[in-house]
Image (cartoon, rainbow, N blue to C red):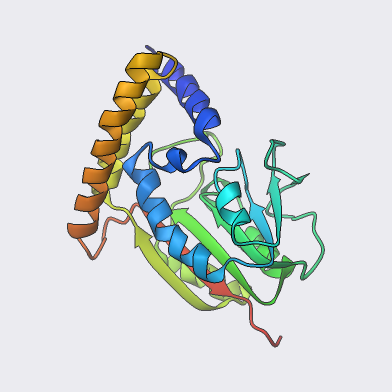
Amino acid sequence: MSYQGIKEKGRAVSDHYAGTREYFMLTPAGQTLLDGLLPLVEQYCSGRVLDAGAGRGAYRDILKDFSQVYFGMDVSPSGATSVVGDVQTLPLTNESFDTVFCSQVLEHVPEPWSAIAEMYRVLNPGGYLILTVPHISWLHNEPHDYYRYTAHGLRFLLRKAGFEEIEIRPAGGLLSLFGHIFSTLWVNLSFGIPVVHSLVKLWNLLWVKVLTWLDRHIEKKKLFALNYVCVARKPKEL
């Protein structure tokens, strides 16, 4: 199968599993990202929640469990979007959300500083931004793949926008990246072949669990962090 064929299969797999916990268990990269995010969502996500860059709605059901109102937004319409718009110029009123959630979006934004400023603008004073960005990643969604982020660069952007109480944690490392490559290949290639795909999923689940366990216990400093997860607060008094 050609590279383009594998990519098309990958889109079909994502469409099929998006919005379920299974989606994050398809690769070690997805699992380690969710493991890093869930504690932040459980602690800081509440009230009116904006999912900025909702895409297929991968996080919709998780966020709904912790919100009073879920509001999905993306540049393209989907079953998860309440409105279509650009995160760099949000079509939303000032101070209208208690939580803004934005996962794996800023690498696709030409002006991420504008996006962060917009997320700050629509947050209520005292509201929280929950954010994830890649540090090491493969090229994807080309040509709209612009940036990778260090913890230092991300903290600078957030402080410049006015955020405080910033906490940034690594999520996954080189083993998750390595595992993601193989998981993607065999999950995508087997998709649409019922019995084979079911068997591959069982094997892949074991692979994901082993790789994520090893990733947590090897290279704990995460100099080669795959992603960063972050929470930051808009000051209560401006």
Q: Quadrant of the N terminus?
A: top left
Image side of residue 28 versus residue 96, left or right: left
On screen, residue 159 above or below 83: below
Residue ID at (52%, 63%): 41
Residue 175 percent coordinates (x, y): 24, 46
Image side of residue 223 versus residue 82, left or right: left
Residue ID at (35%, 38%): 27
Q: Quadrant of the C terminus?
A: bottom right
- Comparing 216 with 232, the one in front is 216
- Asked where in the image residue 161 lies, by quadrant, the reply is bottom right
Residue 118 percent coordinates (x, y): 70, 63
Q: How many marks?
A: 0
Q: Residue furthest bottom?
A: 237
- Comparing 132 with 136, the one in front is 132
Residue ID at (55%, 70%): 44
Residue 149 percent coordinates (x, y): 43, 57
Residue 81 percent coordinates (x, y): 71, 43
